[in-house]
Every structure is written in structure tokens, then in C-alpha cells.
Amino acid sequence: MKKSSSERIEKRITSSVYVGDGTLRNRIDVSSRYFILEVEIKNPRASCPLPGQFFTIECGGGKEHLLRRPFAVHSIVEWSKEYAVIQFLVEEVGWGTRRLRNIMPGDKIGILGPLGRGFKFFQGNHLLVSGGIGVAPLHFAACYLEERKIDYTFVAGFKSSRSCYSGLEKLEGNVLVFTDDGSAGKKGFASSGAVSAFEQAEYVAVLACGPEPMMREVFQMSSSAGIACQVSLAERMACGVGACRGCVRRGKNRNLCVCKEGPVFDGTDVW
């Protein structure tokens, strides 16, 4: 008997990721725009997420807001077969994220993940470049590199001091903060910080996440220097596992399914 599309999607989900309820353990406001959700999962079953992978989280609201929202993993506090604690850095931009900012510790949250493909890492110095909320997966990448004693420079761009993420201060690598108005760190965009970083050191890989024009500029710099650049794309998503094809976008030579083939791509696949 032929299986329905919903049954095929369910099998695809349950065979590789956690799907069910998590419990909000803590909510931490880190700026006027950003907050951290610390979610606890019992018996996660799935493999520990890699930097660049994401989860989809239910925001509630009934039939008007059925679809989960995708959020990159910001940090893994703990992960075992019996118990996991994950942190997500969230930017409040609309109804769904505003509701997430108002939930309380102990509340249940529908969660699905880890999903997608993450970043690849190498032996040698890495350059991480983020813009805005793109800091979330690259913070996880920085922690991952630190655990493995791999050097990195992290260029993080924000609009102003009000939107800066203070958690970067706890990182051990070379962290350079830029703001559009110069109210924190150096004045300028993340891409201008990347130019400076390229002038000061050599890198084996470049990782970028943020506004697409910024990532494209960083990719062009990397290409000129002969360095591979990985970019994390952001698209509206529905299923999160590649079944609905709602997040497909045009790449350089083919269509890219962002949730399943990405969200991390080699820049040469995109431009």
C-alpha cells in the first residue's frame, strides 16, 4: 500500500530528529532586540547539533500561526541521550517572536530538530563574519572552534549599541565589533571589518551569516583571496525537512532547497 505524503514526511522527521515538546528553562533578555531561550529536552534521541543547524519552534496562536519558526542553535549547554539543554538567540521582529519573548519558565514549547546542514571546519585560522541576528549560529561556531583549540577572528556587525549582543565578550577568540553609527566597537559595517581582518591575517576558511548583500560581499572578498567561503542563508520555511519545497531559491546554477541542502552552502553554489 502506497504511503501518503504526510506519512512519508512523518517518517523522514522521526527517523533522524527530535520532534515533541521542550520545556523553557530560562529566558534571558540580552538587549532591546535580542533574547535567549534556553530549552530543555528529555530523551532527545537525535545527534547533537552542529554549528549552522537549526530547530523549528512553535510560536502558538492557533490556526493563524500553524507553522513553526526556524531558529539557529546559539549554544549547547548539555546534550546526552537522556537530557539536552539548547540555547536559541532570538530577535523580536513580529507576532511570533514577541510571543516567544513572553513565555515563562516551565512552559512547554513544540520543537523539531536538529535540521539542515551546518558549517564545515578545518585545521587553521577561521574568519567568522556576522550581521545582526546572524551572530547566533556563528557564536555556536566560535564555541565549537574554541573547544578544539582552533584559532578564529569573529567580525560582528550591528546597527547600534542597543542591538549589540553582549555574549560575545565571553568568547576567547579575536572578536571585532562594528556598529553602523559607531556607538559600540568601531564605526562601519561587518563587511568593512572583514576587509580589515583579511589585511591582518591569513585564513583557511570564511564563515558568514547575516544580510545577503553583506554575505555576498564577504564571499567576493574570499574568492579574490582564494579562500572558500560558507554562507548561511535565511528563507521562509514550512516543513523544515525539504518535503514542501517552500524555501527553494535560485542559486548560481540550480535551485537550492535551503532547509534540507542548507542552510549552509558554499558561496560558489549561491553566486
Image (cartoon, rainbow, N blue to C red):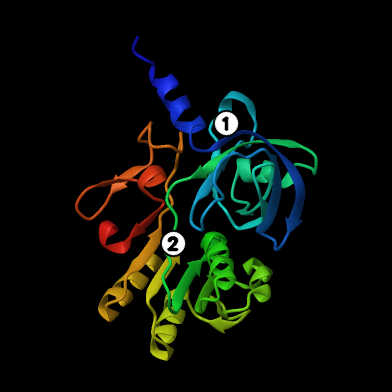
Asked if 250 appears above or below 226 in the picture, the reply is above
Mark found first going from the N terminus, 1 or 2? 1
Q: At which x and y percent is residue 26?
A: 77, 50
Q: Choose between 201 and 185: the one closer to the eye.
A: 201
Give me the disc on residue 65: 1
Q: Is residue 196 left or right of residue 251?
A: right
**Direction from residue 103 to residue 126 in the image, left or right:** left
> Label 1 vs label 2: CA separation?
25 Å
Q: Specify the farthest residue to the bottom.
A: 200
Q: Point out residue 168 in the picture as x, y percentages from the top left corner.
A: 63, 72
Q: Position of residue 206 (x, y in %)?
A: 40, 72
Label 1's element?
Answer: helix
Left/right of residue 76 with respect to residue 120 in the rendered view: right
- Amino acid carrying label 1: it is His
Q: Which residue is mark 2?
A: 211
Label 2: state its secondary structure. loop
Image coordinates for residue 199, horizontal then vertical, percent: 39, 89
Viewer-nearest residue: 249 or 172: 172
